[in-house]
């Protein structure tokens, strides 16, 4: 029975990935998931989730199947609202000096605009659209999700994900320690970066400056949009991987009006068909996004086809995010940057990249703290203010209260990012020790990565590190590494 269940589950996720790819690649305006969910509704019904849950005995494949069934049920409960949101986002736009700008392009538009007053207007228009158009739908979805979690036997989403094996409490403690340990370091580094890139003091910065801050436009000449793909191909070639000959990898570079501005990976078949979607803008941040998604792409494309469903498509997502961060980090690596820049410029961009990473890790630490509170709350009236409070303390930049529901990673995916940053730091240290700082030029390193990628997500990030060199995930170790880059002795 379970073999048939796994096969149908694999087909279900493949069709969802195909539909998601086509919508966000701008190939079709609507995100039509209802028909797919209907055809596979037996996989994720409440009764099916409960039946599988009764067979769970500790960690292992059965628990992954149970999480799949439960998350599928939650997805079915919210799919109509998710489709409405996606379709609405694709259609919304704002007027900017007589020009209509698509809602999904507001972030890139702010990133590329040197006019601070215009950025402020665009951000205000974005927040209004979120508050007036999107939040009513998202509030309804939150109520539906809470009721569905209770049906699945969880007191709250926090309780349910603890039972799925998510280390929420340990990671929250690590997040609190990370925020405390890096507070002064972050404030000093952000103040310096703001002055260098935007000519602003910390007490002057606003949320509409953030896209521009990390756009790093002054580096554009070194990171042109037209060279992104060739740089990726050259990097993979150094590891012995010929991207052009990977028959299971497709690259979508076509320009379409409603295409997502950020690169993304669609693992439609794992490992049979993996699509890397990009809309080149240029600049180091865009290169990082491409390399991040390329890390996902290579992981999925090298995953063994012999693995069962729960090890190819399920498991610890910190693993695939870790491989993505490994490639993304090359854009800040002095050893890799010497291909493009001089030694002094490479060190400068390495420092700037460390500030950016510290910003995001601190932001996600606060996201975890916030989501633990949000998912346990029955009354959401205080959550906009709480969202602003936690994010302002972590990032020193006040967010929009309108984003208190939009800035969420369903299924506590924020934990995967946090654990992935810690995982990547240990893997990278191992590669540098074993193959040198230019490990990305070593075919032997490529062979090791191929072996690790072939495991899919059979092992958790913790288990992979134990097998690799006996190390463990530790956010404070990441804090120490960032400190060495930002304020070397």
Image (cartoon, grey):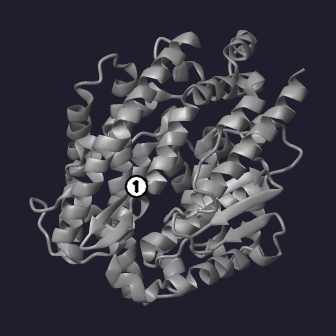
Q: In which quarter of the image is residue 407?
A: top left
- The one of 440 and 22 positioned closer to us in this rendering: 22
Picture layout, residue 188 above or below residue 281: above
Q: Where is residue 247 in the image (x, y as percent from the top left)?
A: 84, 68
Q: Position of residue 274 (x, y in %)?
A: 74, 59
Q: Quadrant of residue 180?
A: top left
Left-right relation of 453 to 319: right
Mark 1: give few (<14), some (14-19) or many (20+) Cα within 10 Å: some
- The one of 329 and 194 positioned closer to us in this rendering: 194
What residue is drawn where x is 50% and y is 34%? 81
The residue carrying mark 1 is: 92
Q: Position of residue 225 (x, y in %)?
A: 51, 82
| Quadrant into which the N terminus falls | top right
Q: Is residue 473 visible?
A: no
| Quadrant into which the C terminus falls | bottom left
- Single out the residue that lies furthest toward the front: 98
- Single out the residue that lies furthest toward the left: 203
What residue is drawn where x is 20% and y is 51%? 396
Left-right relation of 255 to 358: right
- The one of 164 and 100 positioned closer to us in this rendering: 100
What residue is drawn where x is 39% and y is 58%? 103
- The one of 30 and 72 positioned closer to us in this rendering: 30
What residue is drawn where x is 70% and y is 19%? 45
Q: Where is residue 393 in the image (x, y as percent from the top left)?
A: 21, 43
């Amino acid at each position: 029975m379970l073999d048939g269940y796994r096969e149908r589950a694999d087909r279900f996720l493949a069709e969802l990935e195909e539909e998601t790819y086509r919508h966000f690649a701008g190939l079709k305006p609507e995100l039509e998931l209802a028909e797919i969910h209907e055809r596979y509704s037996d996989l994720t019904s409440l009764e099916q989730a409960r039946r599988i849950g009764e067979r769970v005995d500790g960690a292992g494949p059965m628990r992954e199947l149970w999480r799949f069934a439960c998350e599928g049920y939650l997805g079915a409960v919210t799919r109509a609202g998710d489709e409405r949101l996606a379709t609405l986002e694709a259609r919304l736009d704002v007027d900017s000096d007589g020009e209509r700008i698509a809602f999904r392009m507001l972030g890139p538009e702010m990133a590329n605009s040197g006019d601070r007053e215009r950025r402020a207007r665009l951000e205000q228009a974005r927040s209004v659209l979120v508050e007036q158009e999107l939040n009513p739908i998202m509030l309804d979805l939150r109520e539906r999700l809470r009721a569905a979690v209770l049906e699945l036997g969880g007191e709250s989403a926090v309780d349910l994900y603890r039972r799925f094996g998510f280390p929420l409490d340990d990671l929250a403690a690590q997040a609190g320690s990370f925020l405390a340990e890096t507070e002064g370091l972050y404030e000093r580094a952000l103040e310096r970066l703001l002055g260098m890139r935007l000519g602003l003091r910390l007490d002057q910065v606003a949320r509409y400056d953030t896209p521009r801050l990390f756009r790093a436009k002054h580096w554009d000449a070194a990171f042109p949009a037209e060279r992104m793909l060739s740089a990726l191909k050259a990097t993979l070639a150094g590891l012995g991987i010929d991207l052009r000959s990977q028959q299971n990898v497709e690259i979508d570079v076509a320009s379409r009006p409603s295409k997502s501005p950020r690169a993304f990976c669609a693992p439609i078949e794992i490992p049979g068909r993996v699509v890397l979607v990009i809309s080149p803008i240029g600049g180091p941040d865009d290169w990082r996004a491409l390399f991040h998604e390329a890390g996902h792409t290579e992981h999925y494309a090298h995953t063994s086809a012999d693995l069962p469903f729960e090890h190819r498509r399920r498991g610890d997502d910190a693993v695939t995010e870790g491989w993505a961060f490994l490639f993304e980090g090359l854009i800040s690596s002095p050893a890799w940057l010497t291909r493009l820049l001089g030694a002094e410029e490479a060190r400068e961009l390495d420092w700037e990249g460390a500030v950016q990473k510290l910003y995001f890790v601190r932001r996600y630490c606060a996201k975890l703290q916030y989501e633990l509170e949000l998912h346990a709350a029955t009354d959401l009236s205080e959550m906009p203010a709480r969202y602003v409070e936690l994010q302002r303390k972590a990032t020193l930049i006040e967010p929009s209260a309108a984003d208190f529901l939009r800035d969420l990673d369903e299924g506590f995916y924020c934990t995967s990012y946090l654990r992935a940053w810690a995982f990547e730091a240990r893997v990278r240290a191992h590669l540098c020790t074993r193959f040198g700082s230019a490990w990305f030029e070593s075919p032997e390193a490529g062979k090791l990565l191929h072996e690790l990628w072939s495991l899919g997500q059979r092992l958790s990030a913790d288990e992979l590190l134990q097998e690799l060199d006996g190390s463990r995930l530790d956010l404070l170790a990441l804090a120490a590494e960032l400190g060495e880059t930002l304020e070397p002795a």
